[in-house]
Image (tube, rainbow, N blue to C red):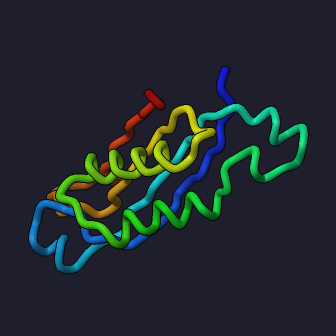
Amino acid sequence: MMDKIFMNELTFYGYHGVFDEEKKLGQRFIVDLTLMLDLTDAGLTDDLTKTIDYGDVYERVRKIVEEERFALIETLAEQISKELLKHYQLLQACTVKVTKPNPPIAGHYRSVAVEIMRERQ
């Protein structure tokens, strides 16, 4: 069984989308993360180096969402997972959910979202 760190509703403003107005005007994106790793040593030693620094994760995700541009939120989720697995050696797997609260779709809905799960190879 894998331990988990949850980071919920990280909110950023980015310029991702297929349509020109999305790329020009931007919009809000919400990211939820589940980070899977063994937290035993962190819990026993109270040592930050035995876990993952949440502030550092937030900043890495912020840079991807706010400074890069993709047509698809699927690509955005993939890039976030790749960055996290590349940078954090303790991380065994992660689930990344990207929610787009206001996509340009006619109709009544709360939001659209994608969720991916990636594991260290």
Image location (x, y in percent) of residue 23: 18, 72
Left or right: 48, with 32 as reference point:
right
Image location (x, y in percent) of residue 101: 35, 60
Q: Residue shown at 29%/63% (left/top)? A: 102
As rendered, which of 101 and 62 lies closer to the eye?
62
Left or right: 57, with 64 as reference point:
right
Kindly indicate the quadrant of the structure image that contains residue 65: bottom left
Residue that extends furthest to the top in the rendered view of this protein? 1
Kindly indicate the quadrant of the structure image that contains residue 96: top left
How many numbered dots are placed on residues in this image? 0
Left or right: 120, with 115 as reference point:
right
Left or right: 64, with 61 as reference point:
left
Image location (x, y in percent) of residue 64: 38, 63
Image location (x, y in percent) of residue 121: 43, 27
Residue that extends furthest to the left in the rendered view of this protein? 20
Residue that extends furthest to the right in the rendered view of this protein? 45
